[in-house]
Amino acid sequence: MEYVRNPIMCVIPPYMLDSIVEKGAGKARAAALKAIKQSNHLRIQRSAIQERPRGDYEVLVSGITAHTCKITRRVYDAEHSEDLPGSHARGEGDPPVKDPCVDEAYDGAGDTWGLYHDVYGRCSIDDRGMVIDQTVHFGEEFDNAFWNGEQMVYGDGDGELFARFTMDLDIIAHELTHGVTQYEAALRYWYQSGALNESFSDVFASLVKQYKLHQDVKKADWLIGANVLIGEEYALRSMKAPGTAFQGHPVIGDDPQPATMDDYQELPPWQDNGGVHINSGIPNQAFYLAAMEIGGYAWEKTGLIWYRTLCDKLGKDANFVRAAMATILVAKEEYGSGSLEEKAVQKAWKDVKVL
């Protein structure tokens, strides 16, 4: 099934676009319809990317270490076409340009690279010095951002419901983390493994933002996409309170994310790949609860537990229970049997009723 083999890992889930088509009007509805139609073409592009040999999108350096790792960013401008990567707009070390999308993408990739490198010792997306390529101004009023298997792509939004997708640092970090997952656990993008894939992206997206703002667990907002979804009271997702990010939105409706397994949604594979964007609220809530219990800066202990789990403990078909047991094991390995950290992680998964 094509939607399983070659998924496009977009930040805007299909149920949002479906709601806009059903309830929206004018430019926003037209943009949503076009975004849905574009998905098949994007899957075909992803299939071609996966099947061809790696080219100059990667820099592979034998024996590279965190001490010798250097960031390399390239930002391109699609100029509202759908041809990738587009024309070169800014390279590593170049000064800012007048286009905020270019500069936001450049800076956001640097902030994401910084968390992974400075905190976890990771050398870029693939841990081997991969060049971070990004394209802005993709398509006409394209309502999404996505990782296509080797680079990031951002739309400008329709201007009515969605703003430009480079506005939120956590969106940039979310999509780039799909690349990290691709090179580590390679979680299949459907059902619970796909929901974990989405959740790991939300976790590290929030951590990148918290690290950038130097926020502890109490000061963090735990929101994803608080600027791209137009309206001060709306965000794409809430890790603190799944199911509340855009309650009562006049066009999109209510946030369907569950916070516990009591409300887990059994969906067919053709509907959000079995609910990958919906059911990710459950592991998101588990991370939030563990981080709040452990306290301090979430990227230090709780983030390390989740990072090591993603890199060392999970296989491509992992489910929620396996992820829960793996994070508990890593907490024990890192901080000791019976430690606050181990107990906090175990309690979090029990509170969301995975265990």
Image (cartoon, rainbow, N blue to C red):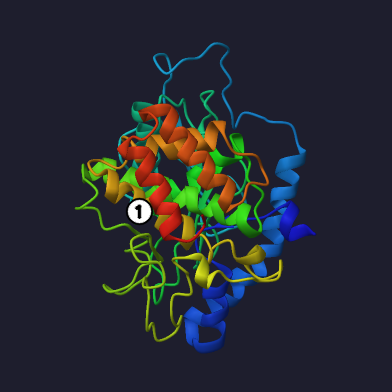
Q: What is the residue that sits farthest to the front in this orientation?
A: 338
Q: Position of residue 313 (x, y in %)?
A: 57, 34
Quadrant location of the N terminus in the rendered image: bottom right
Of residues 335 and 226, the one nearer the viewer is: 335
User: Can residue 91 be seen by looking at this rendering?
Assistant: no
Q: Is residue 211 left or right of residue 24?
A: left
Image: 158 above or below 216: below
The tally of labels here is: 1
Q: Position of residue 252 (x, y in %)?
A: 46, 80
Seen from the viewer's position, the closer of residues 78 and 189 is 189
The residue indicated by pointer 1 is 288
**Residue at 46% across, 40% down:** 328
Q: Is residue 39 visible?
A: yes
> Which residue is painted at 66% across and 43% down in the image?
316
Report the residue at 24% width, 44% height from top: 295
Q: In the displayed structure, does residue 317 sit left or right of residue 2? A: left
